[in-house]
Each structure stands twice: as structure tokens, then as C-alpha cells.
Image (cartoon, helix red, strand yellow):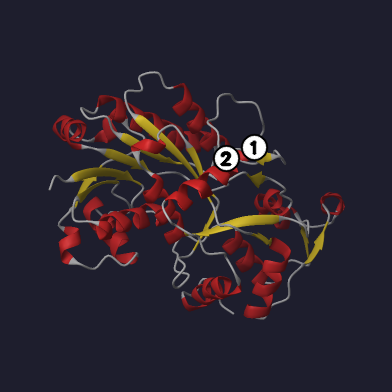
Amino acid sequence: MNKKNIFITGATGLLGAHISKWFLEKADSYRLILLVRKKNNIDAEKRGIEALKKVGVKDSEHFKRVTIISGEIEKDNFSISEKEYKWLTEEVDSIFHCSAITSFQSSIDECRRINLTGTLNILHLASSCKKNVLVGHVSTSFVLGKKNGILKEKVISKLDWEFNNPYEQSKYEAELLISNYREKNFSVIIFRPSIIIGDSQAGKIWNFKLFYEAIRLFSSEVLDVFPGDRLTEHNFIPVDIAAEIICNLACKDEAGKVFHVVSPNNLNCYKMLRKASGFFKYKNPKWISLKEYKESRLSFVQKRIIDPFVPYFNYFGKYDSRKTFEALKKRNISLPKVDEILLEKMFLYCRESGYIKK
């Protein structure tokens, strides 16, 4: 049986590792090529293997189908040798681009360096490949930016709105780059995950972001008030379910489409944080309006801590995900709702891992 060579960036990240696991466990015909950077004096090989082990890859036969290349997504030709790059162009069948800076507090230059330049380098690779490769580009539902409307499952064609932070802007610009890239002798599918949480089995996660950070902040009980709208809802997707959606929909007959990688239900954020406070036994701050927040006497330090969260607790964007659900239904894939049982797993893992010490 011919092996399918899948090139994956960001495989040491949570979603990239789960996508890698999915392919390794799905069939012996998949061979993975992971681009991993050396970091903190830990070599790429070790970082890649450790990430796979973290998500539960155990079978020694699976690791035999993994090749790890030490490189940097933002550098020309990933800063790998000419021989290695040529080998990629000859062998790769499909690409999953998961590598990204996801911090809401990074500068626009830093975000563009990884999220935009990295995407451009992936497009260059895809256009150089001998085979007609499929590129699965992982974006974010937050490309909606400051708009309070509905995000359609459509390719972005122009830059015409504002964003809450450089992360959102750089991911939007990366989508715009893809839609305007001219040397396209390959296929692209864009995946926009909502807020990724721990896996559906045990709530396991290692990059605690956004709402995890808010829960930890609230649990410290250093705030008396917090600017949030009690009607704000968000969509949360367990990381293993997100990987399953992406891997199942990444096929040539879906080329050119945009899919929203979301759960079938949203959660009210105020109610979710009340559940968290009940679970961890802490007192939530009083929620106030944005007007009250601007007029409040909170210190500069307090506001600096709070400000990155403000847009996401006063958020009214919606996602039209009908095409995604229809495509999954054709494949007989049903998605679980994010319910109280799943939230409890999420909270339990936060406590067991020591992330929230309550």
C-alpha cells in the first residue's frame, strides 16, 4: 500500500499534536513529517516525540511512521537544507498548517512573523510540490474581529474591518493571503476553530488560554469588579473533537471551502464562570458594564490585567456553520454538545494539573 505523506506544522501545539495522533491511529498508510523547532535547548526530535506522547501516542509502530525535521516556520525554506526541502517537494501529499502565535498580547510584528510569513512559506512549499497537494490551513473563528454580525463560511477577499488584537488581525491577513495567492497549483481548505478546550475524555490540555486564564484570575479573588455582559456566549470545542472534524473534512472534494470547527451549542459565559466558582469555591467579581469600567477607580495594574479579556466577555459574534454540519452529516459524524459533564472534566483537570490551586 502506498504511504500518504502528511506534512504538519505546529505538531508540538495542542491541536497539531491531536491531528498527528488522529492520522497515526487511523491507518498504517499515513506517514507523518513534522516540522518542529528547537526550543530552550531541547532538540526538535525530543520536542516532537514528547508532544505525541502527551496526547496518548504509545504504540512504538506509530513512532516509526514519524519523521521530524528541525526547522523554523517563519524562515525561508524553513531554514532546512536544500536536500531536505527538495525531498519535501517530492514526497508530500498533504499539508496541515497548525503553527501559530496565539497570544492575545503579542505585537503585530511578532504575530505577522509567524502567522503571516509562516503561511506564505507553506504556500510556497505547496506550489513547489510535485504532487497536487491539499493544504489544510488552521485559522480561527476570531477572524470576525470586532464585528457583532455573523461570520459566514466564506473565503475572505478583502481587509475591511477592525480587530481586538494583533492575533486576530494576523490570522485574518493569513486567510487574505491564501485567497490572493496566485501560484495555486494546489488545493486549500480553511478551518476556523472556535475556543479550544481540553479533550472530551479527560479535559486534558497543556496550553491554558483565554477562559482558563479568566477562571484562574477570578479564583485569585484579586478583583472586586469585572467588565462583562451577562448575555455573552461563546462556542467551545474539545481539542480531540476539533482534530476529528479537521481530519475528516480534509479531502480533495472539499477543496476551496471554509469550515467552522465548532460544537453544536454555545455556552453563556457568565453562567459558565458561576459554575467554575462553585466548583473551585471562590467568589466571582461583580460584573459591570463597559461604561462603569471606564469610570471605575481600578488601578493601572488591574486594568492592564483585565484589558485583554474585555472584548471576549462583551462579545456578540455568531458563526454560520451549516456547511460544516452538513459535510459531517454526510460522513455520519455527530458532534457532542459541551455540557455540564464536559465542563466538570475541564475543571477537574485544571485542579489536578495544579493550574488552579483551589
Place of residue 243 in the rendered image (x, y in percent of width and height, measured from the top left): 41, 54
* Residue under the point 78% across and 56% down: 229
The x, y position of residue 89, in whole percent, is 21, 31
Q: Looking at this rendering, what residue extends furthest in the top direction?
A: 182
Q: Callout 1: helix, strand or loop? A: loop
Taking the spot 71% from the left edge, 51% from the top edge, the residue there is 310
Q: Nearer the viewer, residue 193 or 221?
A: 193
Q: What amino acid is at disc 2?
A: Glu
- Of the pair 315 and 325, the residue shown nearer to us: 325
Residue of label 2:
168
> Mark 2 or mark 1: which comes first in sequence?
1
Residue type, label 1:
Phe
Which quadrant: the C terminus? bottom right
The answer, for residue 356, to whether it is visible in the render is no
Per the image, label 2 sits on a secondary structure element best described as helix
User: Quick check: 329 left or right of 80?
Assistant: right
Q: Does 275 sit left or right of 81 as displayed?
A: right
Q: Residue 90, position in %: x, y?
A: 17, 32
Whether residue 199 sits left or right of residue 134 in the image: it is: right
- Residue at 67% x, 40% y is 150
- What residue is pinned by disc 1? 163
Decide: marks 2, 1 in contact (CB < 8 A)?
Answer: yes
User: Can the viewer see residue 79?
Assistant: yes
